[in-house]
């Protein structure tokens, strides 16, 4: 489903060129999950941004079902983000002016894939059904993260990208959120690439990948 080949990315800083990714290769088959680990600054978030089309690589290839991502125009990348992927971040990125129900269905409506039955099911499974008329500021951190997961899954994307989705939660809440994420990703028929610093959580995913100084390390986590 997702193939990354010899990917390079650097940024220009006041001190000069800063290499971030230095020839990254990885493969994520359809319906599988992968934990992306590594120390801060190893390029994990940058890799997710490149796959999402939020940044452009210096060289290398990102293939989605065999089709290159690079070279696409901005409108095509926006369509990929709208239809092909679900994004979940540690900061939640919910829309404060929309209630829970509207936040939950926002991505699916943009993608013209709103399925009321699936949205209702997500709300029930994520424990959001009693909270649909509340606003994000009225939710706990765990509730906001579950809402962010539901919003990303509502359109049944082919690929879920999650950047430290449990990073701000305690251990018990992290376990609950990850269990829900893995189960619902499977029910949606999506693949999952998740950044995490936790070896314990990484072990719950079907594959593990470790980045060090912008390169994939061969050892298992």
Image: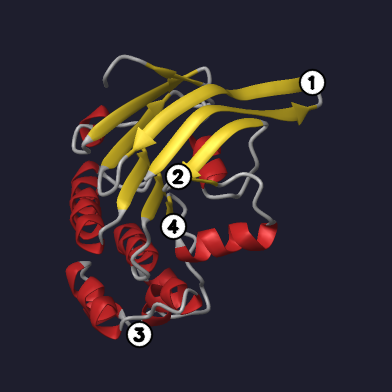
Q: Who is closer to the viewer here, 148 or 213? A: 213
Which residue lies at the image location 48% right of the left edge and 42% below the top edge?
A: 63
Report if the CB atoms under discs 3 and 1 are less than 8 Å apart: no
Q: Which residue is mark 1?
A: 16
Q: CA distance from mark 4 to mark 2?
A: 16 Å
- In x, y percent, where is residue 141? 35, 58
Q: Which residue is mark 2?
A: 66
Q: CA distance from mark 4 to mark 3?
A: 26 Å
Q: CA distance from mark 3 to mark 2?
A: 42 Å
Ranked by sequence position, the earlier of labels 4 and 1 is 1
Location of the C terminus (image quadrant): top left
Ranked by sequence position, the earlier of labels 2 and 1 is 1
Res. 166 in view: no
Q: Which residue is mark 4?
A: 85
Disc number for residue 133 = 3
Report if the CB atoms under discs 4 and 3 are less than 8 Å apart: no
Please state which of the two labelled residues, at mark 2 or mark 1, is closer to the viewer: 2
210 shown above or below 172: above
How dense is the environment of label 1, judged by Cα within 10 Å: few (below 14), some, or many (20 and up)?
Answer: few
């Amino acid at each position: 489903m997702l193939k990354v080949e010899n990917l390079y990315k650097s940024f220009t800083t006041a001190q000069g060129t800063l290499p971030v990714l230095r020839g990254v290769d990885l493969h994520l088959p359809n319906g599988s999950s992968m934990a992306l680990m590594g120390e801060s600054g190893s390029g994990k978030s940058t890799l997710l941004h490149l796959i999402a089309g939020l940044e452009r690589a210096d060289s290398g290839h990102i293939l989605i079902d065999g089709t290159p991502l690079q070279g696409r125009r901005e409108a095509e990348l926006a369509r990929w983000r709208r239809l092909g992927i679900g994004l979940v971040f540690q900061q939640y990125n919910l829309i404060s002016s929309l209630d829970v129900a509207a936040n939950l269905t926002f991505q699916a409506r943009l993608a013209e894939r709103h399925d009321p039955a699936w949205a209702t099911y997500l709300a029930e499974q994520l424990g959001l059904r009693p909270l649909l008329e509340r606003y994000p500021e009225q939710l706990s951190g765990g509730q906001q993260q579950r809402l962010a997961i539901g919003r990303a899954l509502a359109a049944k994307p082919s690929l879920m990208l999650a950047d430290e989705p449990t990073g701000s939660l305690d251990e018990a809440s992290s376990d609950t959120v990850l269990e829900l994420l893995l189960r619902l990703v499977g029910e949606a028929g999506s693949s999952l690439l998740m950044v995490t610093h936790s070896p314990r959580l990484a072990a719950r995913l079907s594959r593990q990948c470790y980045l060090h100084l912008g390169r994939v390390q061969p050892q298992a986590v």
